[in-house]
Amino acid sequence: MDYSCASCVSLSEDWREYYKKGWDGADRPPFLSPEAAHLSPLDYDYACIGWLEKHFSQSFSALHSSLRPSGNLVKTLPTRFARRWERIYSGPPLWRQLIFFLAFADSLRSVSEKTLRVAEMYSLGLGLSSMEVDHTADSSRKSLPEFYDSLLFAVVALLLGLDHGMGKKNQEDIVQRFLSHTIKMLERQWEEMENHFQFPLNITELKLQDYLNGPSRLDVAIFFPLAIESSYINVGMNPPEEAIKLGKMLSRVRQLNDEIVDIEEDIRAGILTFPYMHGLCCLEKRGQIKTFIEQLWRTKESSIDPQKTSSIERGAYELLLNSGSLKATAIESIRLINSCTEMVMRLFAPDRCFSLCLLITQRFAHIRRLEQNRWKEIPMEMIRQPSSMG
């Protein structure tokens, strides 16, 4: 597979033209031109968050009023659950997931009470509880009882979310899809946990393609397919096959981008992600990368000095950087994004989906930002968070 292109970020000309029509229709907001994501990705990210927050301010406000610890919905839940919810509730991470529900509904001109109820069901049933489980599972400081406690909380959250969805008229189809996507996500996570700290027998180009095309851990972000499918159902339409495929593609883009950002955290947790798999396919670096991974995984079972662990992680990062594996991951993400843009152009008129254009192009901007910073994420305090969800 050819990863030798001069720049790993490239928006198609067709997408630029399509995007420009939506940008023109939105009165050309500053820093959000078709070229801005490439030229000034951080400014683009700031402007994108600001525009979306303003555009969906009423919806955000309604969701926050319902989902915050003292909110209308949470007050109706069991006391023990509500106390735990108060401890973990964080508006911005949830906002980053819920915005896709609103953007897809916006593209179908269907942002309504139904949309907000689906967003509530998702948030309650999976949005924050799954993040809590991930955080507990990835933290070496957490005990087994604490992990089981988080897992039980997630099970209760899922049941409450399903109950909240079933209590709404004509939402049964969405509840069934939510449950189906959740089961698939849990299957992927279960499979991943069984393979923690294990090398595959042989990593080949074919296995890399299988990983990219699924099913794999790239499919775990269920809010993309659920957001798309629920938007169609809420307007009385069956989701077209291409829209369902778009949801899967966006999930994989999101995970690939995260695999660049989380290369140290993932390998520390025993997870072989695409950058490492690509590196292990590289004949020149395979032995060195395998040695670094084995050294790091041994620290899981011993009390090696944290400074030595950090040194091993830096060494692995430099090897992935020099082998081109981080760039290769970015290129695969861009290829998927280009496929997503083609689907969006076939599914929606440009004057109806500027919010969706922003969110997809923001994925380009994220890659471009990483490319400018040697594939490292910028400090989080530099990334503006929306205020609408506290």
Image (cartoon, grey):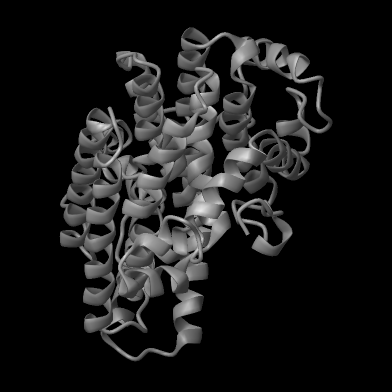
Side of 234 where 373 appears, left or right: right
Q: Is residue 329 at all visible to an observer of this figure?
A: yes
The image shows residue 110 at horizontal and vertical percentages of 49, 22
Tell me if residue 162 comes above or below residue 312 in the rendering. Answer: above
Name the quadrant containing residue 19. Answer: top right
For the C terminus, the quadrant is: bottom right
Which part of the image, by quadrant, shows the N terminus?
top left
Q: Can you say whether 302 is above or below 72 in the image?
A: below
Residue at position x 81%, y 22% in the image: 28
> Would you say 274 lies left or right of 345 here?
left
Q: Residue furthest right?
A: 30
Q: Quadrant of residue 133?
A: bottom left
Q: Residue at x 34, y 40 (%)?
A: 222
Seen in the picture, residue 153 relative to 157 is either above or below; the reply is below
Left or right: 23, with 243 as reference point: right
Residue sitting at x 23%, y 62%: 156
Q: Position of residue 107 (x, y in %)?
A: 54, 20
Is residue 274 or residue 381 the one in the foreground? 381
> x%, y% of residue 254?
46, 41
Q: Is residue 289 left or right of residue 3?
A: left
Considering depth in this image, is 261 or 279 the residue closer to the camera? 261
Say if 148 sits above or below 174 in the image.
below
Q: How many marks?
A: 0
**In front of the other: 288 or 67:** 67
Report whether residue 292 is seen.
no
Residue in the picture at 52% in, 27% down? 111
User: Residue 24 in the image: x percent, y percent?
Assistant: 77, 14
Observer-nearest residue: 243 or 113?
A: 113
